[in-house]
Image (cartoon, rainbow, N blue to C red):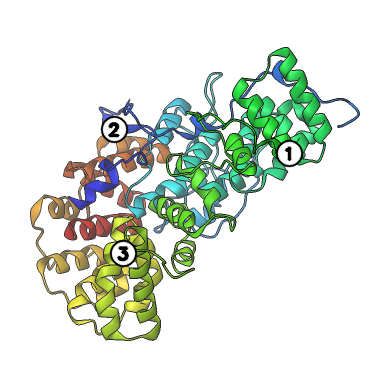
Amino acid sequence: MTTQRYTSRTTGISLSVCLCALVSGQFVVAQETGAPMSAIDWLSESVSDAAIVAPPTTSIVPDEPAVAATVGVPQVTVTPLDTNTGQALGLLAREVTGLPLGLWRHSDADTLNDLVAAQQIESLPAIQDLLRTLLLAEAEPPKPTNSTPDLFLARVDKLLDLGALEPALAMLERADTTDRNVFRRFFDVGLLTGQENKGCDILTARPDLAPTLPARIFCLARNGDWSAAALTLNTARVLGDVSDTDDQLLTLFLEPELAEEAAPLPPVSRVSPLSFRMRAAIGDGIGTASLPRAFAQADLRDTAGWKAQLDAVERLIRTQAIAPNTFFAVYTDHQPAASGGVWDRVEAVQRFDTAIRARDPNAVAATLPVAWSAMQKVHAERAFATTYADDLSGLPLGDASDLQFEIGLMSASYETIAVDAEPKSQQDWFMVAVATGRFDEVAAIGPLQIAIQAAFSGAKPAQVSQDLVANGQLGEALLRAIVQFNIGQQGETADVTQALALFRMVGLEATARRAALEILVLERRS
């Protein structure tokens, strides 16, 4: 069924760590064979200080009440980060999210790190909203152990897995960039977003922070000290501190005029942001389609061709790593010059966009089904609804009115759309009941509707979730509920009930309604 596609149709872009389950309150993770690399796998490797060849010296509050009713990704309010003092870490202030400062405080740090790492990349938009809010929320860290990685870094790595580089960079900028683990993420994200100068400026003052020798040489050249860069590379050759592959790439980067006569660079199984950036600089760029999702952000620059930009936004919209207006700005930037695949989708959306701007009901009714089908193929239904639902509202669309209704329910105006709707079927009536929270006039049919109605009619969350909330472990309870909901989409409807019930119990009524509506709309279109 269509709802399963967000969890089972991997094509290399679904989970960094997957097949998560909650068993008797214990978190169990099974590694998927062939799963895409997580952020920690493609980030620059840290190296010891001894491996860095230095350039010549002449060159150089108590817990707050329950959660607010609406959780999304609102305007960012910046809170300074300091991983050493234990203060609250995050970009979204608690006044915005409604989440308490003690979100993580009482949970085991290792468990939280595992739960964050195991969160599914592609899911329903309402669930993605909640996950992203948890990753960005201002909250105090759990008590660390000597061997426990920082939860802050786990949150940043999950943002990188999602391809959400801008908020990840904003988090890192407010952390201690002289910390090695923070800096290597900061440096790599800067490379992918065209802001590498920020990292290189830090390395000018602190060359010991270079995550790799090539990073040190790159920044020397980037800052204009080509002679020091060449000397550093030559010294590394003599000492045997540079691989043949890195030697060839760095040589061509420092002397690009040699590229025409040089042997082709060998393919590599592991592409770092630095090698990706340097290969592009010497005219040997690597396509991002087979690389981790974060690399797609590099194709959003003006220097990339339109086809590359289209492919990038279609990857990134699946995880809401870009805003809907960015997606549609690329989609409508030029007229398609070919047909098939992405070009057909672009043409369908452009025809609809022209019709909706003209407020022509007949043209809208004719183009809407094709445009909506195109958006379903790339999992951009939420982006389409966010952009066009208000403009669609009130237009007389005849046979396309069913789509008009469903798209409205996928938007932030879902409750208003439901109140004004004229339901035609039991499914319509049930979705109106979900949107308004009133189930007294409709009976559920089928396992999924029954599971959803139970959650809105007094069903309780799993006991382990109730206990976590009672113990002040709200963040852990929500992470487990997200996992549980995603499992429920695959047919375990009891998990859908318990997850939705947990959201409602802690005040996330809007999250529960939107997730239920999305799973119903997507099932209905299967």
375 shown above or below 113: below
Of labels 1 and 2, earlier in sequence is: 2
Q: Is residue 379 left or right of residue 310?
A: left
Q: Position of residue 204 (x, y in %)?
A: 79, 35
Report the residue at 26% width, 36% height from top: 463
318 shown above or below 201: below
Q: Is residue 239 left or right of residue 361?
A: right
249 shown above or below 348: above
- Determine the image quadrant of residue 112: top left
Residue type (three-letter) at the residue carrying disc 1? Cys
Of labels 3 and 1, earlier in sequence is: 1
Residue 19: assigned label = 2
Mark 3 or 1, closer to the camera: 1
342 or 492, which lies in front?
Answer: 342
Q: Is residue 95 left or right of residue 130?
A: right
Give the CA separation, mark 3 to mark 1: 43 Å
Residue type (three-letter) at the residue carrying disc 2? Leu
Q: Which residue is mark 1?
A: 200
Give the CA separation, mark 1 to mark 2: 39 Å
Report the residue at 26% width, 63% height from top: 373
Residue 393 visible here: yes
**Residue projecting furthest to the front:** 261
For disc 2, the neighbor class at 10 Å (few under 14, some 14 to 19, many from 20) is some
Mark 1 or 2, closer to the camera: 1
Residue type (three-letter) at the residue carrying disc 3? Met
